[in-house]
Every structure is written in structure tokens, then in C-alpha cells.
Amino acid sequence: MAAVEDVTANLPSLQFEAALTREEKEMLYLRGRSHALTVSACAQAAFLVAILNDARQKIVEIKFPVKKRSSKLLQEAPKRDPLLVGIIGCGRLGKQLANTLLKIL
């Protein structure tokens, strides 16, 4: 797979920063910070989904231990379906969250 190149590298007038005022250029660091916060939020959401899924399975195992089940059908019951997650909106955070969850699952 070929690497993606920046076609505006030698064309300063087409780069993102060209249209910014001096005051706006001073705030460019916020773009990186925003990206870092988005990635952090997605990582925390993915971790929360994993924790909730594990907790849900533990609750099922505690309430219905395998040894105390009287029916053969209950003994052979598969584990519960994994936790379902819905994302409302597909803005920057929603898109990143969906990508993160799809990669870990």
C-alpha cells in the first residue's frame, strides 16, 4: 500500500494555515489537543464497554451457577450476547468512537 503524500507540502497558499489570521495561528495547538481528547474519550468508552460486558457475564454466572441448574437445556445455554452499543450522531467523536469500538471488538 502506497503512503499518502501531502500534495500541499510545497504550496503554502493551499495549506490549512494559509487562511488563518495571526490570532488564529496562535491557537493551532488546540487542534492537536482536541484530537488527543477525542482519542482519550474513545479509549475510555471502549474500556467501559469491555467492563460492562464482563460485569454482565459475571452477574449471569452468579445468579445461575452451572452446578445448580436442573435442566440440561439450562446447563448447555450459551453465554449471553455481548453488550450492544448505540452511537447517537456521527460527528467527529461519534465517528472516532465507532472506529475504536470496531477495532477492539
Image (cartoon, rainbow, N blue to C red):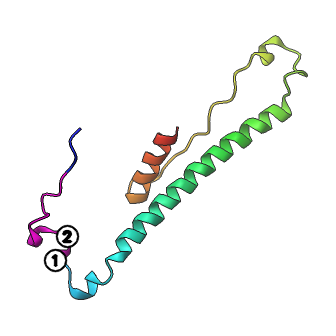
Q: Is residue 102 left or right of residue 72?
A: left
At 56% from the left and 49% from the top, the residue drawn is 46
| Residue located beneath label 1 in the image | 19
Residue 6 location in percent, x, y?
Answer: 17, 57
Q: Are marks 1 and 2 in contact (CB under 8 Å)?
A: yes
Q: Position of residue 58 (x, y in %)?
A: 77, 37
Q: Is residue 2 left or right of residue 29?
A: left
Q: Which residues are magenta?
A: 5-18
Which mark is drawn over residue 66? none
State which quadrant residue 14 falls in: bottom left
Q: Is residue 103 left or right of residue 50?
A: left
Q: Quadrant of residue 7?
A: bottom left
Q: On the image, numbered disc 2 is attached to which residue?
A: 16
Q: Where 35 falls versus 74 (above or below)?
A: below
Q: Is residue 74 above or below residue 60?
A: above
Secondary structure under tag 1 reads helix
**In this view, 72 is above or below 93:** above
Horizontal arrangement in the rendering, residue 44 relative to residue 73 (left or right): left
Foreground pick, 1 / 83: 1
Residue 97 highlighted magenta (yes or no)? no
Amino acid at dot 1: Ala
- Residue at coordinates 44% horizontally, 64% vertically from top-left? 36
Q: Is residue 11 magenta?
A: yes
Task: Say which of 31 and 84 sits in front.
Answer: 31
Give how far apart the Cα atoms at labels 1 and 2 are. Answer: 7 Å
Categorize mark 2 by other alpha carbons within 10 Å: few (<14), some (14-19), many (20+): few
- Quarter holding the N terminus is top left
The residue that appears at 46% across and 41% down in the rendered structure is 103
What residue type is disc 2 on?
Answer: Phe
Element on which disc 2 rests = helix
